[in-house]
Amino acid sequence: LKIGEELNDILSLVLTKTYLGIGFWYTCEFAKALHYFAKALEINVSANALWGISSLKAWIAEVIITQGKIDLGYTISDEALRIADESGDIFSKAHAYTAHGWSYYYKGYLKEAEKYLLQGADFSVRINMLFYAATAHFGLGITFFDMEEYTKSQMHYENAISVYRDGNIM
């Protein structure tokens, strides 16, 4: 981050702030995660990079949801989804559809969660974005379990595990 600032390297700054946000989210330091995501979002907004705006809003939505603010997370993921669809970019669609699927899951709308998580998984697999593919499949595992469709649930859990193992993730 310091080197990126010294060189005024915008790409390094966006990526560093994004990955710092992810790291802080995983360690449950939500305020720090949101701070870095917001800083990366500012850069994308100033560049009018729709794919970056959408992806960061999806990450922000997931942090907000993790904190239990389901309605706010849903609103932000819905905005990320609209921007991703406007951009037409598959990278942002993978993020936005997955985040929106999780939003629906936590709101208790399981059929809608299924729809968006399936699309998020599809977009993620098509661009080999393994972490998000696993995240979507894990969400589908939970969703189908809650729908008492245990065979489908098991299949998606196995898909998530397979992606984690094959990608050497987590």
Image (spheres, rainbow, N blue to C red):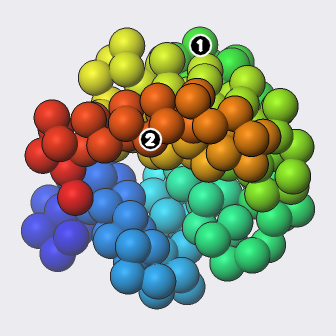
Q: Secondary structure at mark 2?
A: helix
The answer to which quarter of the image holds residue 96 is top right
Instruction: In the rendered view, tell whether residue 56 sits above or below residue 136.
Output: below
Is residue 99 left or right of 130 when viewed as pictured?
Answer: right
Which-is-in-front pick, marks 1 and 2? 2
Instruction: In the rendered view, tell whether residue 135 sits above or below residue 65.
Output: above
- Is residue 31 in sight in this rendering? yes
Q: Amino acid at mark 1?
A: Gly
Task: Indicate the position of residue 135 as horizontal and vertical percent values.
Answer: 46, 45
Task: Indicate the position of residue 20 as horizontal and vertical percent values.
Answer: 32, 70
Query: How far apart are the alpha carbons under marks 1 and 2?
Result: 29 Å
Residue drawn at x 49%, y 64% as measured from the top left: 37
Q: Secondary structure at mark 1?
A: loop
Residue drawn at x 47%, y 83% as measured from the top left: 28
Q: Which residue is mark 2?
A: 157
Residue drawn at x 28%, y 23% as measured from the top left: 128
Is residue 97 left or right of 103 when viewed as pictured?
Answer: left
Q: Which residue is mark 1?
A: 88
Indicate the quadrant containing the N terminus: top left, top right, bottom left or bottom right.
bottom left
Viewer-proximal residue, 54 or 156? Answer: 156
